[in-house]
Image (cartoon, helix red, strand yellow):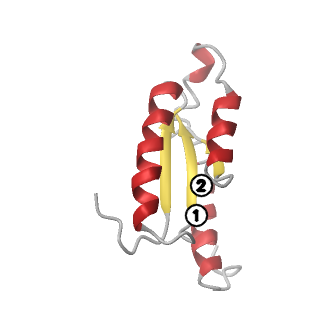
Amino acid sequence: YYIHGANGIFMVFSLFNLTRTLLDLEWWYEHLFKQIQSKTPTLLVGCKCDLIKNVKKVDESVIENFRKKHDNVEFFKSSAKKNYNVKEIFVEMTKNILDIHRFKYDKIL
């Protein structure tokens, strides 16, 4: 992986397979944040939220514990299949990147 100069990072895990995929993010967090500036905007994205209605409810405390451990990283649930929160996630990342560089974005977004 190569992330030098990244303007933003999406940390994506599956809400359908929460335990395994969120645990995998621990490894990524440890390795990525050794290489990037602490100001790099990061969003935590739980994908496949359209599938969780068919399985037992997602344990929100697992996600909250992960967020607390990692500076309360901003969290979104999403579904590409249902187009749920897809645009909102990219708009939020864009705002975060522009904020760091102190750009005015009210006319852009």
Evaluate if marks 1 and 2 touch, with contact meaning CB atoms under 8 Å apart.
yes
Judging by the rendered image, the residue that carries numbered circle 1 is: 93
Task: Name the image quarter holding the N terminus.
Answer: bottom left
What amino acid type should be assigned to the residue bearing mark 1? Met
Note whether 32 is above or below 65 in the view shown.
below
Q: Position of residue 45 (x, y in %)?
A: 56, 45
Q: Position of residue 37 (x, y in %)?
A: 49, 72
Cα distance in 3D space between marks 1 and 2: 6 Å
Q: Is residue 84 left or right of residue 64?
A: left
Residue 83 shows which numbered tag?
A: none
Note whether 48 is above or below 92 in the view shown.
above
Q: Is residue 7 left or right of residue 58?
A: left
- At 47% from the left and 72% from the top, the residue drawn is 7
Quarter of image, res 50:
top right
Q: Position of residue 13 (x, y in %)?
A: 49, 38
Task: Name the image quarter holding the C terminus.
Answer: bottom right
Q: Position of residue 17 (x, y in %)?
A: 48, 25
Quarter of image, res 15:
top right
Quarter of image, res 20:
top left
- At 66% from the left and 80% from the top, the residue drawn is 105
- At 63% from the left and 62% from the top, the residue drawn is 92
Find the residue positioned furthest to the left.
Answer: 1
Number of callouts in the render? 2
Helix, strand, or loop for circle 1?
helix
What amino acid type should be assigned to the residue bearing mark 2? Ile
- At 42% from the left and 37% from the top, the residue drawn is 24
Note whether 31 is above or below 18 in the view shown.
below
Judging by the rendered image, the residue that carries numbered circle 2 is: 89
